[in-house]
Amino acid sequence: MEEPVNASRMTQRYAKKREAILHEAARLFNRSGMKGATLSDVAGAVGLSTNSITYYYKKKEDLVVACLLRSIETVSGIIAVAAQEAGPEQRVRGFVTLFFERLARTAAGDVTDGSELMTFRDVHVLGSPHSEIVFGAYVEMFRKCRRLLASGPIRPGKRTELNARTHLLLTLTLWTMSWSARYDPEDYGQAAARMADILVKGIGAKTARWGMTALDDALTTALAAPSGMDGAQDAFLRAATALINEAGYRGASVERISARLNLTKGAFYHHHPSKEELIAACFERKFTVIREIQGIAMAGKGSGWDKLCAVSRALVRHHFSEHGPLLRTSAWSELPEEMRAAKLDETSRLDRRFVSLLVDGMQDGSIRPLDQAIAGDLVSGMVNAAVLLDRWVPDVNGENALELFVRPLFEGLLAER
């Protein structure tokens, strides 16, 4: 009878060590990205040798998949609890609240019930078959989340609209992992309530109306004008951006970028000595677009609501235009350590401009009283999430994306059209 007891202890010890590995690995991957964190780093964090780590996970990709699947399982569990609420509004509020409660436990160091959740930014970096495994699990989680917004059976004609709004809800909720650390754990509940209020009720005051203005025309004209960049260089950056968004750092090989433009590898190295510098250049191109659009709007006429709506519409429309796409923000993790801080700082400065427009709107009465910092993060997150909208709405374009994806954030996820 002694052997089963020993076997049970070994099983418990194995499970406990595996949990410690997943916790530290998720923390390191979140901080440094899959490219930046190594098995050796994870081993050192849990007091093991690298060879010992391979007893649990043979390759780094296996460990990444395990971290991501555990995050999906955790979020799916939160969705299941929120789904027990009576109606869509209560379910949305419940989902956001429960997710923040989970993040608060992590921030407070509760490893037993708050181990680190891995963000989903590195899914693109995984190759086959790992990416298919993770994406298959993510799709199941997405379907469960979609039920939170449904007030009844999901009719075929409603599926496209629900898919877009579900992507908005799920992505913005997961996006909180990137900015929640600026709050003390005891304040997470307040942040959750304010975020849920924005998602449910939208941003505008009662008098605010969604619709194109003269400012939209001005921004469209500005985006269509030449940026001053060499045409071949701009085409190269567009192709590189599209491949990085689709396949991550590894998938955006020099060969694939060059082939998409019918260029030689030599042409790549003529413009960019390394792929890291190419990614940095793609970021700069994105920053230039955002800064120009924000600047025109801030100097133009109209209410804060008009300006914020117009900027958001212009950026999402630009992403799907012949001049797009925009680089996904999470690509920063694929940069060398010395380049990351500068790109994150620039991203933060541009996000603060969204906050400035929100403040203008509250002062002129076009935007209702709300938490400007959280609303700014949601607007920025929405623009970034548009990069992956075509996964859930295959026929999305620069026009229907405005109604399906941008408008629900400004008027509320549950607003009827």
Image (spheres, rainbow, N blue to C red):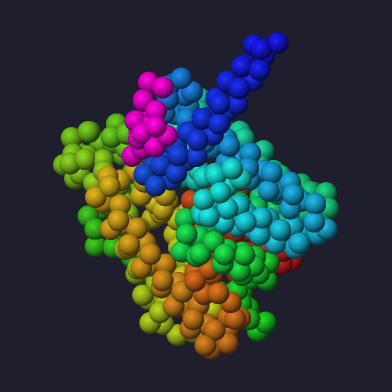
Q: Is residue 237 visible?
A: yes
Percent position of residue 113, x then y: 61, 45
Left or right of 88 in this view: 192: left
The image quarter containing residue 411 is bottom right
Q: Is residue 71 above or below residue 191?
A: above
Taken as a whole, is the magenta stretch helix, strand or loop?
helix
The magenta-colored residue range is 36-52
Left or right of 411 in this view: 88: right
Percent position of residue 91, x then y: 74, 57
Which residue corresponds to the image point at 74% horizontal and 49% vertical from the top-left?
A: 81
Q: Report the label total.
A: 0
Q: Is residue 57 highlighted in magenta?
A: no
Which residue corresponds to the image point at 37% horizontal and 21% vertical from the top-left?
A: 51
In the image, farthest residue toward the front: 2
The image quarter containing residue 295 is bottom left
Left or right of 238 in this view: 171: right
Which residue corresponds to the image point at 60% horizontal and 26% vertical from the top-left?
A: 12
Observer-nearest residue: 321 or 361? 361
Observer-nearest residue: 36 or 136? 36
Q: Is residue 320 above or below residue 1?
A: below
Percent position of residue 45, x then y: 39, 37
The quadrant of the picture occupied by the N terminus is: top right
Q: Is residue 246 visible?
A: no
Q: Is residue 235 above or below residue 224?
A: above
The quadrant of the picture occupied by the C terminus is: bottom right
Percent position of residue 34, x then y: 39, 38
